[in-house]
Image (cartoon, helix red, strand yellow):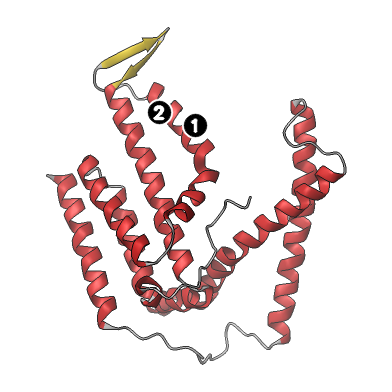
């Protein structure tokens, strides 16, 4: 559980940390959109180099990004095996009994793996370089135009930021409960399927109770401080858009447009 890094903020003084959260959110959206375009290995290589540059500028260690991928290894492996045998495109490379592996299946599997790695890396960089409060302010500013059609911009941005903030907290709580249950003789690794189901239930039930208790405590704390989502709000911190934000956003947009054009040609 300690390998999960999504949602954790790293208080470094870097160029990426100082950028406006609105710019980082919009850039993330553009990058996620470009990732899903089939620009070939050259296109994904360009995005990968761009992500590496962002990681270096943010002063985040590459090992930190790799740690964020560890919880995804099982899902990635499952998807790779499933796609290799399910996608029947291209030429047959070799057969394993009645199952055949095609060249197109391998290429598509590689694309899916690269996309997952890029998505996790980009999201990790965003949460590691942006404070939860700044993320809330950025989302609220971006959602503000939707207020005209009755969209609860502040409430949605608050829920998203709280959810991201509670990811590492719940993971730490899960690890604590697992150690407590293990000290009582519960084995999460060995035993029959029935024993494993019982072990998981013994983990999930107290975790849900703890999560609801934390949510209630947070709601009571916000209410005791006079929080009113419908009230007129002033902001202690005002976001400032700088020239560096404009140049960074333009660089990201130009690269993403180039990737999309490469996929179309």
Lower position in the chain sequence, tag 1 or tag 2: 1
- Give yes or no for contact between labels 1 and 2 (Cβ–Cβ under 8 Å): no
Q: Secondary structure at mark 1?
A: helix
Residue hosting label 1: 78
In three-dimensional space, the C-alpha distance between marks 1 and 2, rounded to whole angstroms, equals 9 Å
Residue 235's disc number: none
Q: Quadrant of residue 243?
A: bottom left
Q: Residue placed farthest to the right in the image?
A: 184
Front residue of 213/232: it is 213
Measured as percent of width and height from the top left, residue 175 is found at 71, 51
Q: Secondary structure at mark 2?
A: helix
Residue 200 higher or lower than 105, as above or below: below
Residue shown at the point (19%, 45%) measured from the top left = 263
Residue hosting label 2: 83
Measured as percent of width and height from the top left, residue 258 is found at 17, 55
Residue shown at the point (54%, 62%) measured from the top left = 7
Residue shown at the point (21%, 66%) measured from the top left = 251
Question: Is there any visible trace of residue 146 in the rendered image?
Answer: no
Front residue of 171/158: it is 171
């Amino acid at each position: 559980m300690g390998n999960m890094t999504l949602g954790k903020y790293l208080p470094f003084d870097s160029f990426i940390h100082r950028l406006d959260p609105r710019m980082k959110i919009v850039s993330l959206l553009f990058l996620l959109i470009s990732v899903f375009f089939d620009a070939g290995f050259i296109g994904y290589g360009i995005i990968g180099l761009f992500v590496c540059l962002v990681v270096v500028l943010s002063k985040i260690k590459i090992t930190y990004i790799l740690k964020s991928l560890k919880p995804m290894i099982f899902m990635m492996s499952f998807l790779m095996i499933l796609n290799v045998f399910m996608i029947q495109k291209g030429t047959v490379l070799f057969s394993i009994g009645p199952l055949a592996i095609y060249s197109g299946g391998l290429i598509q599997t590689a694309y899916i793996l690269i996309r997952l790695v890029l998505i996790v890396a980009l999201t990790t960089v965003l949460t590691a370089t942006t404070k939860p409060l700044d993320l809330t302010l950025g989302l609220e500013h971006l959602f503000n135009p939707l207020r005209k059609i009755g969209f609860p911009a502040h409430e949605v941005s608050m829920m998203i930021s709280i959810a991201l903030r509670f990811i590492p907290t719940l993971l730490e709580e899960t690890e604590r409960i697992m150690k407590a249950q293990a000290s009582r003789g519960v084995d999460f690794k060995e035993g029959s399927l029935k024993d494993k189901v019982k072990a998981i239930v013994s983990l999930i039930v107290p975790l849900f109770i703890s999560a609801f208790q934390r949510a209630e405590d947070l709601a009571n704390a916000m209410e005791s401080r006079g929080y009113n989502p419908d009230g007129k709000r002033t902001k202690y911190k005002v976001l400032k858009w700088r020239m560096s934000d404009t140049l960074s956003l333009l660089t990201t947009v130009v690269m993403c447009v180039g990737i999309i054009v490469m996929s179309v040609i």
